[in-house]
Amino acid sequence: MVAAAIGTLAAAGNLTFAQIAACLIVGTLSWFAEPESQLSAWLVRLDLPFKVLVLGYFCITVFSLVQSFPEPDLTALLDLVLVLVGYKLMQRKTNRDYMQLYILAFLLILAASWLAQSALFALGFAVYVVALVWALILFHLRREIEDNYLVKHEASTAAQRVTAARVLDSRRVVGRPFFYATAAAALAVLAGATIVFALAPRIGIGFLTGGVRRHGSVAGFSDQVELGHHGNISSDNQTVILRVGMPRLLDQPSEEARDAVIASLYWRGTVYDTYENGQWLRSRSDLTRTKLSTGFGQGPNQWRWVSGPETPDKPPSRKELLALADRQEIQIMGVSLPVAFALDSPVAFEVEEPATGAFLSTQIEARYSGEAALRTMRTSPYGRALPLADFAGARYVAYSIDSLRRARPGAAKAITELPEGLLAPYLQVPADLRKRLSGLVRRITADHKTPAARAQAVMTWLHRSKTYSLDLKRDPSVKDPLEDFLMVQSSGHCEYFATAAAIMLRIADVPTRYVNGFLGGEWNDLSNLVTVRDNRAHSWTEVYFSGFGWTRMDATPAISRPSRMSRLKQVADSIELWWGQWVIEYDASRQLDLARGLAKSLGFKRQPGSAFSLPKPDKRLVYGVVAFGLAVYVALRIRKRRVKPGQRLVPRAGAQGAVQKLYERSVRAVGSLGVTKQASETPREHLQRACRAESALAKDYGGIVATYEAVRFGTRQLNTAQLNELAHQVTAVEALCKERLQTRKAA
Amino acid sequence: MSSARERTTPPRPSSIHGTLMPEPPARAGGARKKRSLWKRLPTTREGVWFMCATLVVGAAAVNAGLNLLFLVFGMMLFLILASGIMSELCLRHLVVTRKLPTAIHAGTPFLMGIGVRNNKKRTPTFSLEVEDLTDERPVERRCYFLKIPAGREQETAYRNVVNHRGVHRLVGFRVSTRFPFGLIRKAHDIPANAQMLVYPALVPVPQLLAAEGGAPLPDRRNARASRSGEFHGLREYREGDDPRQIHWRSSARRGRWLVREHEDDAGGRVVVKLQWAEVRQENENQAFEQAVSMAASVGLWFLKRGYEVGLSAGQVSVGSRAGNQQSHALLAALALVTMDDVKAPSGALGTAVVVARVTMADSAPRVTLASGARGQAA
């Protein structure tokens, strides 16, 4: 059970490799540390040092909690629980220890249910439930045995408790059928838990306190990005950030063509304009603020059109923009920052109206430099929408026009038409850096007059002179990491390339901005979605070309990444998708969907209004339900009659008739042993003959004969209780005869 | 099986012939007495904690809108439900029988046998506790059955002490189980009336080996029965009777062995006379009980030594007989005798060599031996 709980937690991705390894080692050791074993005796001697260690760890945990106040880091508590589990596994002596172990395992499951996103939770949880049922039953039996069974070896000695292991090891008590039956009970519990999960009312979140669950933090999307963190791609990090459905991808003529398109998808996230001391920041100038406008859109959904100060005075119509744009149905997960990701460059966002019963909704908000953000709103029972501080993911639709491939003149204002001071943040370079890099930039761009040519020259130089590497080297004598990359090092990753391109172009008087996002993704044939994982993090540069607007330029040398998942990965990804939609995001609106589906399958149709009605009930279905109900009722009635011994055994006749029939039944039973009653025999003579053949019949059969004679030939009247008693006697005779018959057959 | 034996045992009169009057075996699946839901589902200490934890998890799930927490909440709810169903299955179709001891003396521990038959076809019953109920309350001790396989019967016994003589009513059984998880103790009360006749407590007898006149009373265990007395009548042959005493003609006529009885078997007849005496008011009950115990002990003392012993306790009297059956007769009479019975005037003592008088007293009952007389009145 403990292993299942830890496994569930590990599946939630909240245990480090070291923690998992430690748990495995301790768990394996504890297997051999059964009470009364040598290892256990050895561990008992180490009890005091263990206690001191655990106490010390407890103090450290409390200290770290106090330190992190007012937003306590609960992972410290989780670590403490793991330490306690390890301690208890090694120190199992009494029932109390086992009970504490079960409680700790339950706390781990609670933690997993709080933190888990993966469908692996279901597997771990199912194993945990089965193990829990077994553990609780065996624990109960063990305690009962120890409490109730005493053994006394000698008259002079005191009675001792029987060891539970001796009794439980006997297969007569706990055998294979026992485990099968209890496993079935555990599966029933699991099914019941699923029913409760589906039917429990979702009245909202943060009803009393708290809010949504936070996801793990992904570096690179906060207000301040330190160079060298976001692009540090790790192929191990498989956290899904986005799942995107794109109609354009379905129209591709071949898989290769689709792979090529996917590889060129730039998922734009955060945009920065200010570079200082190796960090990218936002200047938050009002001039650079993104403009979001409502208006043209299809359906009742919330539409937000993206524009900025560089948008021309006579922009293309929104209909034209939509015709040019790629539609992306985006689901964000695994990010705690509310960034509205979209393909480069977004022109509109569409958010569905919250479904009836949904208690969360999403709003699009403006940021800077053409960037948009998301905000999760909690809908109160009174209809008020209140913003939540935490972000738990969202679904929306984005429309984007590729800024590089679809670049066209007139798409943006010329530089001269821009408001004064608008480009200042995009040309900002720290003075000392400008001073040190000016010579290099002049040398690279000397022969290039136009901004586009300068940009191309810088990109070419970076591609030729620097190589892509995740194994970053850093010369501590050089203050700025960008200067180190350009002047000392020969390799770097995307952040360095993008920053270098942005700063060098700014020195060459070309406005640029720095973008963090993701590049490419993996196609899933089963769900027809592109999955973007954390290991696809990427950075690039946007350059402002007069009349063309902000255009994406990627200075990083091309890296080949697979754009297709293996079949197994596709299945796993599809399961995760289903799990996310139907478990993690299950809410009142999903409950309503389920109810509607059920009603529809039962023949109910929804009228344009609100209530369900039954205009044309499916007669076959109705008759089927009625027939099924009747069958269940009859079966229950029959069963009820069977389980009432008195009613079943006593024939429905007058008392005398009942006695007669009961007597005949007993005669038939005795006859099955070969002692058939002759017509000339009196009941008493038959009894005597039966007793000679089988002496054990004397008691019950003798009683039956006596009662029969008293009723049949005397004046004795039997009440219901006496009839029932007679019936029990008949049953006993029948059972005895059956048993004897079986014994004879066996012999 | 003993349960089958008990079923056919005819009810016996509750006066003097034995200690117990059992009734038919009780069935857990049959007409059990309904108790209130709370009484039938009392939670154990762990159960209370578990239910509290369930409520907390449920509240947390609703508050935080955490769907996986709803799953844990559902699991906890259904564990409670499964606990109720499985314990109910354990308690169904059980037949409980008493295995009654032959003699019970007040203040002396005895073993009360309990047999349970599991009449279910497939399902075994686990972790069953059976308690005897007296006046709706369980006795302090209980019987535990770890596992009763389907269609099998198991027996065990519990040790009990009844402190007062007289008739004690057992009204039924309480079968209960905490299986499977120990969260709920589910119990059914099964009516099964039985009367238990508790004999008086036995106490050490004082020095009675010397008669009032100083001559020691002989031990008659090895004494041969005399045929010198006056013919009294015929009785059934009992084991140990002298075959020479068989009345052949009557035996042949009746078809069973009959032996002669004589009026006076060489002075081996004793009458234990329980006498009321004035004692302090607050001491009266205790003094009476002590006297009853002493009378029973004295009677058994004489019976063990081969005497024919009778009893005279006011209006309650038992004719003089020897043997084991007579000890039950004496003890049964003394188990039921009341102070009013003793205060009432007694009839003739019959022929007796020795009269053992047990008289109530404040400290301890007084025991005196006197030579008997034919037809002596109290």
Image (cartoon, grey):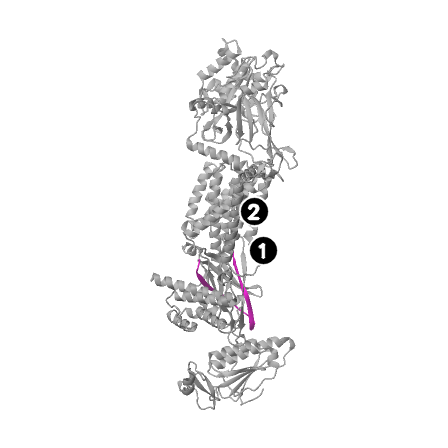
- Do callouts 1 and 2 mark residues in contact (Cβ within 8 Å)? no
Asked if residue A138 can be seen in this view, the reply is yes
Q: Which chain is disc 2 placed on?
A: B
For badge 1, the amino acid type reads Leu
Label 2 sits on residue: B54
Name the front one of labels 1 and 2. Answer: 1
- Depicted A134 relative to depicted B323: above or below: above
Side of A692 relative to B106 (left or right)? left
Secondary structure predominantly adopted by residues drawn in magenta: strand
Stretch of the chain drawn in magenta: B150-177
What crowding class fits label 2: few (fewer than 14 Cα within 10 Å), some (14-19), or many (20 or more)?
A: some
User: Is residue B72 at least partly visible in the picture?
Assistant: no
Q: Residue A731 placed where, x, y %? A: 45, 64
Q: Determine crowd level at label 1: few under 14, some 14-19, many 20+ residues with C-alpha closer than 10 A.
A: few
Residue at x 54%, y 58% (from the top left corner): B187
Residues at discs 1 and 2 both on one chain: yes
Question: In the image as oriented, which residue stretches furthest toward the left?
Answer: A747
Query: What residue did someone put label 1 on?
Result: B37
Considering only vertical position in the picture, is A436 above or below B173?
Answer: above
Q: Chain of mark 1?
A: B
- How far from the left and from the top, in percent, is residue A496? 49, 21
Q: Secondary structure at mark 2?
A: helix
Secondary-structure class at tag 1: helix
**Identity of the residue drawn at 41% across and 54% down:** A169
Q: Nearer the N terminus, badge 1 or badge 2?
A: 1
